[in-house]
Image (spheres, rainbow, N blue to C red):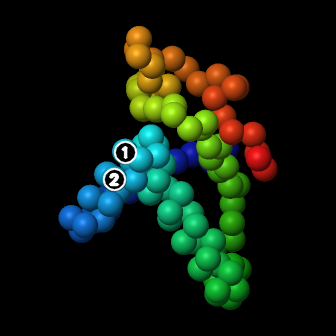
Amino acid sequence: MSQMTKIHVALTEQQVRELTAIEALTDRPRTRIVRRAIGEYLERYRKANPDFCPVSPVGESVTERELKPGLKTDIMVIRGVKQEVIVTENGWRMPAAGDWVEEGG
């Protein structure tokens, strides 16, 4: 898996309101929503501009699996490493294999 890099993005107030609404409706962290949107945009750009592909070849891709509906997540720093955890009514826990939606279904 490739390493993630931080960037700073300035958004309009409307974009922030919409992101907040999507975050509340989907129970997904804002960073995941933004990463997925940027990934989809880059994919569409590559398809529309085939001459761009040789200039910027695709490296190792990161596939984000989708969590089952109703699970809330948060990011915690555990031993100096940021990790996604599942928020429960009693606290939090590490994600288990059964927390993810099966691929293709």
Pointer 2 residue: 21
- Residue placed farthest to the top in the image? 90
- Residue placed farthest to the left in the image? 13
Local packing at callout 1 (Cα closer than 10 Å; few below 14, some 14-19, many 20+) is few
Pointer 1 residue: 24
Kindly indicate the quadrant of the structure image that contains residue 45.
Answer: bottom right
Q: In this view, does 61 lie to the left or right of 87?
A: right
Which residue corresponds to the image point at 57% horizontal and 46% vertical from the top-left? 3
- Tell me where residue 41 appears, x and y as whole percent: 54, 72
Q: In this view, does 105 lie above or below 35?
A: above
Which residue corresponds to the image point at 77% horizontal and 47% vertical from the top-left? 105
Q: Which of 19 and 85 is in front in this view?
A: 19
Q: Is residue 104 left or right of residue 64?
A: right
Q: Is residue 90 left or right of residue 13?
A: right
Tally the numbered discs: 2
- Tell me where residue 21 appears, x and y as whole percent: 33, 53
Residue type at the position of mark 1? Ala
- Tell me where residue 10 appears, x and y as whole percent: 27, 64
User: Is residue 102 shown to the viewer in this render?
Assistant: yes
